[in-house]
Image (spheres, rainbow, N blue to C red):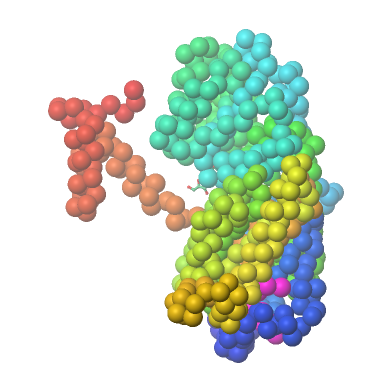
Amino acid sequence: MYPIDLPAWQRLQQDFEATRHLHMRDLFRQDPGRAERYWLEAGGIRLDYSKNRITDRVMNDLVALAEECRLPEKIAAMFAGEKINRSEHRAALHTALRNLSDAPVVVDGEDVMPKVRAVLSQMGDFARAVRSGQWLGYTRQMITDVVNIGIGGSDLGPLMMCSALAPYGSPRLNMHFVSTVDGAQLRDVLDKVRPETTLFVIASKTFTTQETITNARTARAWFLREAGEADIARHFVAVSTNRQAVAEFGIDPAHMFEFWDWVGGRYSLWSAIGLPIMLYLGEENFIDMLEGAHLMDRHFATAPLAQNMPVVLALLGIWYIDFYRSGSCVVAPYDYHLHLLPKFLRQLDMESNGKQVRLDGGRVRAGTGPVLWGESGINGQHAFFQMLHQGTQLVPVDLIASLEKRSNLPGHHEILLSNVFAQAEALMQGKTAAQVRAELQAQGQPENEIAELLPHKVFDGNRPSNIILTDRIDPRNMGSLIALYEHKVFVQGVVWGINSFDQWGVELGKQLAKTILGELTGAIEPAEHDSSTTRLIRLYRRTNCAEDGTCALFE
Ligand code: F6P
């Protein structure tokens, strides 16, 4: 059944027609209980969703839509380890990685919890040894630098968490993340570190990803210029599901941290992929992060849909995407250390829900995953917020901040938070022509200038935002926050009837790049391409290949 054919969807269409002309400032004026009613708390996170273009009827119908899509059943199926990632025949069990209860989680008849706990304890032992200096490099010096080589989910989660939680990080460890294959990033990192004191974490679920394996090979060759083959064991560890490929690469599987195919790349920071997080923050903080996520999982699994934070956040997104036809949404953290959060969430959301085919193979008949973008809110205010306030598109915004001061510099946090609250208020209230006129008259502006300026200074308002507050940015609350967004994405996928856990859309480019790589290097003759691609390949060859046609692949 397509969601648009469900009774609740039809009612929502009517709700949209009935409410789209309402202004939120009137809704606030008429309803003193609005802020209190549209407020949720779960797992260290507070959500104020009162500044959305909703009424009780809209919310009831959105929740009814979730029920008609059998969301409770689907949530239970995910937690139970059913193979909900149907196109890859896999479960999606990131929740098992942070299952800190005694409850078993069964996949294919096997309780996966013992192996989850075993890897967690292997990670703990290793992190303790590295952090304490018990684990030494080949010249008996302590490890000072950790270089994570991975891309996508094998990069963004650890990178974002290490940055978000930097105040909890070891001052003795410098963390580096290498993801791109253009060489400049790896070269920059290798220029800064020494082989004697560097630990490389090669992170790849498949261990076949071209960018990661190329970077890992180059790092290995760099290391071997100073050290011997036998020293690799003290400086290279792998995180993967592919034991054989790890061994073939030359890393002893004894130095491999395993995870499993039921952990999706963009949902993997809770698994061994989180090793850099644990190295940097320590085992206790890593467990706290898991606990925070577990709290959100419990809330998601048990709270009634209308009071369920991920569900509410997801349904609000659907309201804007499918009824207001808004194609994008912004995440604006008001916290310097969270500046990578939008980047992380972009993969989470867009790789999960950027789909047009339903689980049953049919085409969707509704809008699906939006373009998610954003950056530090305070910087955004001086860059793109203009468009959010006065542009022609409706772009819902999540404003994220911590109540606790992030530094002891006097006055800074107050200014920061005043901007969070002011932006949400401004987006919602706007400024009427009458207000602008009164302001300009009070400034003594002549009438002809007022008439000229007035239309530019009017803000329509009625622009939606959520405020997401934590008491403080700590490992536990970060765990809750990320789990909140993971579940939000899942709920939207359920309503649209798509598989949020596969990513076939990334394959075609990879496949074509393989052929083109051969053509660029002269290994194979240019095949038949469109005239644009052929022209580009020829240009590259003219620039980089010798006259006899030979092109060096590696220096
Ligand atoms: O190309 C997309 C992707 O498969 C992501 O889903 C994944 O997070 C990333 O590549 C890295 O994959 P791997 O961990 O297997 O190297």
- Give the quadrant of the N terminus: bottom right
| Residue that sits furthest to the top in the current view | 139
- Residue 321 found in image quarter: bottom right
Q: Is residue 531 left or right of residue 25?
A: left
**Per the image, is 57 magenta?**
yes
Q: Vertically, is 91 above or below 230? A: below
529 vs 258, nearest the viewer: 529
For the C terminus, the quadrant is: top left
Query: Furthest residue to the left?
Result: 547
x and y percent of residue 514 in the render? Answer: 34, 42
Q: Which residue sits at x=70%, y=19%?
A: 135
- Let me know if residue 16 appears in the view: no
Whether 397 is among the magenta residues is no
x, y percent for residue 547? 14, 28
Q: Nearer the viewer, residue 66 or 106?
A: 66
x and y, in percent, of residue 239 in the image: 61, 35
Q: Is residue 230 above or below residue 416?
A: above
Q: Is residue 184 left or right of residue 6?
A: left
Q: Nearer the viewer, residue 317 or 121?
A: 317
Q: How many marks?
A: 0
Residue 207, percent across and down? 52, 37
Q: Main secondary structure of the magenta part?
A: loop
What stretch of residues is rendered in magenta? 50-58
Q: Do we see residue 127 in this rendering?
A: yes
Q: Nearer the viewer, residue 242 or 369?
A: 369
The residue drawn where x is 71% and y is 48% is: 412
Residue drawn at the location 53% of the way across and 12% of the way down: 227
Q: Which residue is found at the position 66% from the left and 59% from the top?
A: 419
